[in-house]
């Protein structure tokens, strides 16, 4: 007996495997295509010429590659132009076929072989053309040759006027920028000068830019006024030069002590502080006047220091008055001072340095009153001690101040004639030993302008 096999769906489950295949809609196909594109890697091209490089998308053909390279370098029509790929960047198949370090691209075939299977390519440009130019700067903005202007003015207290006008450039010059491109804007404080004189009408403004616009105008000062105030309020200082003349080479300590009403502002070479009112130098002195300062490892011919007194104790009218000083014009003062310094035993070189170092301060005054201090008064302010015995001290301390023409009349009995008759050697305590080259000598010259 034969039986036949028949196909029937009675034995298959209702949700069979074949029932899962359904026709996809367009939206699902679009999503799959987007996913595949996201996974695809875009191949890049690096173009190199001399020390310049740029990155582009890798072209599909050699003509496109050459066009990109020429557009970047912009070579002249007659310039040599070639493209090559280092073998380490080319495809494995292409690098096996050459023995040199480069694969020169001469057409479509060599280009397709070089990029076969690579994700990125480096192409070097071989040319005698100049490097590609930098990106041109953006064009400058158009010049501002006209703009409205408003002036709020107070003619007298309580009377205000408003001038509304238009400011125009006479020669079409840009009013918004300087020649270097600096933009002129912001708030300015200064002086506005308006002139109406016959047929002359002009407006001139001179001012300073306000850095902090929140500061009220009442708190502003002109820079020139501020510089004058700073100079006027700066305390005067005594400028001192100390020279040491030794008959032989030797070591010594020089100690400067100032009165508590004084303070040392500057020492050069830098001195070693001992306490608030005392500093010390450790030196090796030579017969020629050279001083070796060991701490700074410097060699100099003199020590320099400045001291400032307490401003409350400085009274110009008391420091230099007709009872203790002498006055004369600036033109007469300098030759007179040279003569006095000669009487005090200073050499021509020392006298010249003294005048040259202070001529700027002297020349600032039409008339000058001056005096020299005695050694006791100098030591009361600034005392000097030296670890060398014996030592001949010569300390010249000049005090001077400027006088107006009216103030000169107060020194009617204390002028140049009276100053020439003064025994300045006795006042400063000058000794003949200051000229003895076998003695250990110390010379200090100090100048103090009281204002």
Image (cartoon, rainbow, N blue to C red):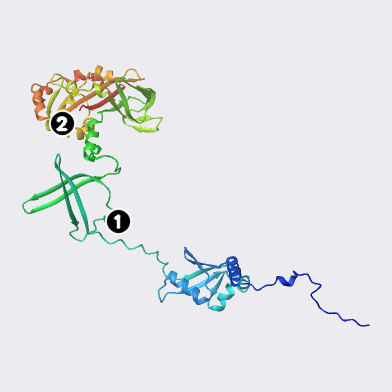
Picture coordinates of residue 338, whole percent (x, y):
17, 29
Q: Which of the 4 quarters of the picture holds residue 237? A: top left
- The answer to whether residue 310 is above or below residue 47 is above
Mark 1 and mark 2: Cα distance apart in space: 51 Å
User: Is there any visible trace of residue 58 in the rendered image?
Assistant: yes
* 379 displayed left or right of 253: left
| Label 1 crowd (10 A; few <14 / some 14-19 / many >=20) | few
* 302 displayed left or right of 132: left
Kind of element beneath mark 1: loop
Query: Which numbered disc flags the more N-terminal residue, 1 or 2?
Result: 1
* 366 displayed left or right of 120: left
Residue 21 vs residue 445, the one in the foreground: 21
Most extreme residue toward the left, as rendered? 198
- The answer to whether residue 433 is above or below residue 178 is above
Picture coordinates of residue 61, whole percent (x, y):
53, 76
Residue 229 vs residue 235, the one in the foreground: 229
Kind of element beneath mark 2: helix
Residue 40 vs residue 356, the one in the foreground: 40
Give the quarter of the figure containing the C terminus. Answer: top left
| Label 2 crowd (10 A; few <14 / some 14-19 / many >=20) | some
What label does residue 181 carry, if any? 1
Picture coordinates of residue 350, whole percent (x, y):
24, 30
Picture coordinates of residue 40, whole percent (x, y):
59, 67
Q: Which of the 4 quarters of the picture holds residue 347? A: top left
Residue labelled with disc 2: 334
């Amino acid at each position: 007996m034969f039986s036949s096999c028949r196909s029937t769906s009675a034995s298959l489950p209702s949700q069979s495997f074949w029932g899962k295949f359904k026709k996809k809609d367009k939206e699902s196909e679009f999503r799959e295509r987007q996913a595949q594109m996201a996974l695809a890697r875009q191949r890049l091209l690096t173009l190199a010429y001399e020390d310049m490089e740029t990155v582009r998308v890798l072209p599909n053909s050699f003509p496109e590659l050459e066009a990109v390279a020429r557009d970047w370098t912009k070579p002249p029509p007659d310039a040599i132009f070639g493209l090559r790929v280092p073998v380490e960047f080319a495809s494995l198949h292409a690098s096996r076929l050459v023995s040199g370090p480069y694969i020169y691209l001469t057409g479509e075939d060599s280009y397709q072989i070089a990029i076969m299977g690579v994700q990125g390519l480096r192409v070097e440009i071989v040319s005698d053309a100049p490097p590609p130019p930098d990106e041109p700067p953006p064009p400058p903005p158009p010049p501002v040759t006209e703009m409205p202007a408003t002036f709020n003015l107070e003619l007298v207290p309580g009377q205000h006027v408003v001038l509304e006008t238009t400011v125009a450039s006479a020669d079409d010059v840009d009013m918004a920028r300087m020649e270097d491109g600096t933009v002129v804007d912001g708030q300015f404080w200064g002086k506005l000068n308006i002139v109406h004189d016959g047929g002359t009408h002009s407006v001139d403004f001179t001012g300073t830019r306000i850095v902090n616009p929140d500061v009220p105008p009442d708190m502003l000062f002109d820079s020139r006024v501020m510089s004058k105030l700073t100079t006027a309020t700066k305390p005067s200082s005594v400028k001192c030069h100390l020279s040491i003349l030794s008959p032989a080479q030797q070591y010594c300590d020089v100690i400067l002590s100032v009165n508590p009403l004084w303070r040392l502002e500057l020492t050069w070479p830098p001195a070693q502080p001992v306490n608030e009112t005392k500093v010390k130098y450790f030196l090796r002195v030579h017969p020629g006047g050279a001083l070796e300062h060991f701490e700074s490892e410097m060699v100099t011919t003199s020590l320099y220091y400045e001291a400032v007194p307490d401003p409350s104790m400085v009274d110009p009218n008391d420091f230099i008055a007709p009872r203790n000083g002498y006055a004369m014009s600036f033109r007469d003062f300098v030759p007179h001072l040279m003569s006095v310094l000669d009487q005090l035993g200073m050499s021509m070189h020392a006298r010249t340095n003294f005048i040259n170092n202070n001529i700027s301060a002297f020349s600032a005054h039409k008339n000058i009153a001056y005096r020299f201090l005695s050694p006791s008064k100098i030591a009361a302010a600034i005392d000097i001690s030296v670890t060398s015995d014996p030592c001949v001290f010569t300390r010249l301390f000049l005090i001077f101040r400027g006088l107006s023409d009216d103030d000169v009349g107060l020194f009617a009995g204390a002028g140049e004639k009276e100053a020439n008759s003064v025994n300045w050697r006795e006042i400063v305590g000058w000794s003949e030993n200051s000229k003895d080259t076998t003695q250990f000598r110390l010379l200090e010259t100090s100048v103090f302008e009281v204002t």
